[in-house]
Amino acid sequence: MAKKDFELRQSAGACDALAWAQYKNGDFKEAAASMTRALAFGTKDAHVLFHAGMIYFRAGDVVKSRACVKEVVAINPKFDKFHAHR
């Protein structure tokens, strides 16, 4: 579904969803590439940046991972990774 969404709309949200699906499937290199596209939109969303930190870490880019996590804390010091879709 994430691939179809990305085909339909080239947005930060669609790129994030695709990146997270790729991450969950263990395709960390592709997830990092998709996340780089998501962040190119200039999003400053703590949830997206948390995803980015996790993805970059698993892709082996610790520097980018730390930068994303620091940005999450700067945006929302009380950020909690728990997220429930309604």
Image: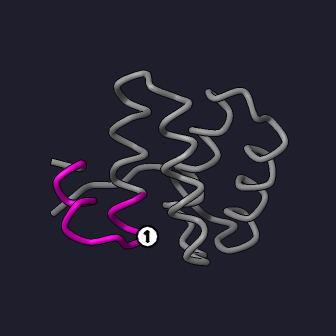
Res. 55 image quadrant: top right
Judged by its main secondary structure, the magenta piece is helix
The x, y position of residue 2, in whole percent, is 23, 50
Q: Is residue 26 above or below residue 81?
A: above
Q: How is the image coloured?
A: one colour
Q: Quadrant of the C terminus?
A: bottom left
Rendered residue at 40%/59% (across/down): 15
The x, y position of residue 18, in whole percent, is 34, 49
The x, y position of residue 36, in whole percent, is 59, 55
Is-magenta flag for residue 14?
yes
The x, y position of residue 12, in whole percent, is 43, 70
Query: Is residue 4 or residue 23 the one in the foreground?
Result: 4
Q: Which residues are magenta?
A: 3-15
Mark 1 is on which residue type?
Ala
> In screen coordinates, is 76 left or right of 9?
right
Crowdedness near tag 1: few (<14), some (14–19) or many (≥20) residues, C-alpha within 10 Å: many
Query: Is residue 47 or residue 82 the one in the foreground?
Result: 47
Q: Residue furthest top?
A: 26
> In screen coordinates, is 40 left or right of 22?
right
Res. 20 image quadrant: top left
Count of numbered marks: 1
Q: Residue furthest right?
A: 63
Is-magenta flag for residue 7?
yes
Q: Determine whether the residue tagged by mark 1 lies in a helix, strand or loop.
A: helix
> In screen coordinates, is 61 left or right of 25?
right
Rendered residue at 19%/67% (across/down): 8
Q: Is residue 56 above or below residue 81?
A: above
> Mark 1 highlights which residue?
12
Q: Is residue 1 above or below residue 31?
A: below
Rendered residue at 73%/44% (across/down): 65
